[in-house]
Image (cartoon, coloured by chain):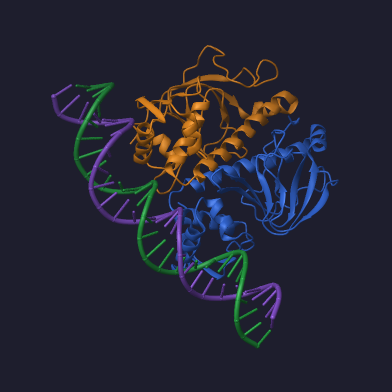
Chain colours: A blue, B orange, C purple, D green
Amino acid sequence: MPSFGPAFAPRSLPQGNAGDARSANSEGGLPATGKVLLVPQDAEIYGEGDAAVLFYKLVRGVVRTCKFLNNGRRHIEAFQREGDVFGFEVGASYRLTAEAVSDCSLIAYRRKGVEQLAAASEVLSQQLYGYFVQGMTRAQEHALILGRRSAIGRVGAFLQGAAQQSQDGRTISLAMDRRDIADYLGLTIETVSRTLSQLERDGVIAIPVSRQIRVQKATRLSDLAA
Amino acid sequence: MPSFGPAFAPRSLPQGNAGDARSANSEGGLPATGKVLLVPQDAEIYGEGDAAVLFYKLVRGVVRTCKFLNNGRRHIEAFQREGDVFGFEVGASYRLTAEAVSDCSLIAYRRKGVEQLAAASEVLSQQLYGYFVQGMTRAQEHALILGRRSAIGRVGAFLQGAAQQSQDGRTISLAMDRRDIADYLGLTIETVSRTLSQLERDGVIAIPVSRQIRVQKATRLSDLAA
DNA sequence: CGATTGCTTGATACCTCTCAACCCAGGTGG
DNA sequence: CCACCTGGGTTGAGAGGTATCAAGCAATCG
């Protein structure tokens, strides 16, 4: 069990995340001693069941954390983005697999050492605590998306979230392919593709190229994700 | 429509440290200073957006934490059971609504006071930390269930989880009605009912009365939740 | 009793999955 | 340069599953 010190000052997190999550360390944060890694696209960072010795902070790129089901399907639990911390486990092993969606650079931390530091540093323990809270909030919002019954509602919610995290709030650059989106939304690639096409026909979005989406009518998008 | 219990009149109770489920108390745990409340079935404990002054530990009964969507639907994020802690927020207000599924008794804690105590007690902060981790794990597993595409897979996963938490591992007493289950699984009450009937016809489960389910073939249930 | 509530069952429409073909851009090699 | 291949994406037709609307049933309650 990690020994976490006083961890409960209501700490404001980069929630909607306007690209702020990157300034996390500087002073008192995660130790700069972590090794920087370069991971090529589609490479595995760690696998479900591996001993959870390290955890990671993503510097550049996109990572998917996912689970492979008995029936051959894949469930993507979350997409990690720049500034996100992932792979910090409670038990001895990873509960998910982490793979690079795009070429990534990330910093690895020794879990054990950081836990010791956290016991002494209030700032650090609060920071780690914040990463956990962020993870839980995301998991709940993901469940909310998957609870929507229609494909258009799920895709709409996904696009809305992606747009909020984009620079101008409406131009989305997708690092992941349609299969990733489908496995994240609990749909098939065909349904994702069809739904995007329909949204484009309806003028809600524009898709100049398949990996780039521009939101044209944000209000209508919000209505879909009702 | 649910005929909402009028008066949410929580009476105070003699501090009977009743069914404390798992987590450590005894020394350094949550302070025993919390008020004990009795909440009647279907009463609201707190509402989304309310100031998050208190959080709660459930002593007896079942609570649902949920969200009401614009389209009139309801999303149940989790069922809280005996020993669970809920309503501990990061921000200033509750992000979900909490309602009593059955008559409940629960202990309320002042968030502010506990946060101060947690700053001093490593045991307590670890305990609260553990509650958060549990919440995140559950949210992820819920997302995993909702990611399953078929109704029988979702219902099967729900039953499997309920059976694991039961006394003998196979006799389930449901505190919630079909609507609660449906809103938790992202299905309709009719589909839930039909799926349960089919599972009974197939001999996987027995339903002597609608709120009681006995698992007959655990292996087949596991296969469904593949 | 009649009314209400929770649950089940039926019929039909709609939506998503499945299987399949096709398109397009990029890469390779003759 | 072009033929060919490949992978990602789109589109089509049909089957299957779930939502919807509706009715029926049992238990509870006034």
Residue occupying the point 47% across, 24% down:
B170
* Camera sees residue A139: yes
Answer above or below: position of C7 versus B26.
below
Residue B141, percent from left and from top: 56, 38
Q: Quadrant of residue B28?
A: top right
Seen at 56% across and 48% down, the residue is A72
Residue B149 relative to residue A177: left or right = left
Q: How many marks on residues?
A: 0
At x 51%, y 48%, the residue is: A145
Q: Residue at x 54, y 12 (%)?
A: B16
**Residue B106, x across and y down, in percent:** 52, 22
Q: Position of residue B216 (x, y in %)?
A: 43, 26
Q: Position of residue B114 (x, y in %)?
A: 66, 26
**Relative depth, front residue between B169 and B89:** B169
Give the quadrant of residue A103: bottom right
- Give the camera-side residue of B161 and B92: B161
Q: Is residue B115 left or right of residue A71?
A: right
B84 up-or-down from A49: above or below: above
In the depicted structure, whether residue C23 falls above or below residue A165 = below
Q: Nearer the viewer, residue B112 or B226?
A: B226
User: The N terminus of chain A lies in which quarter of the figure?
Assistant: top right
Which residue is situated farthest in the right direction here?
A33
Q: Is residue A29 visible?
A: no
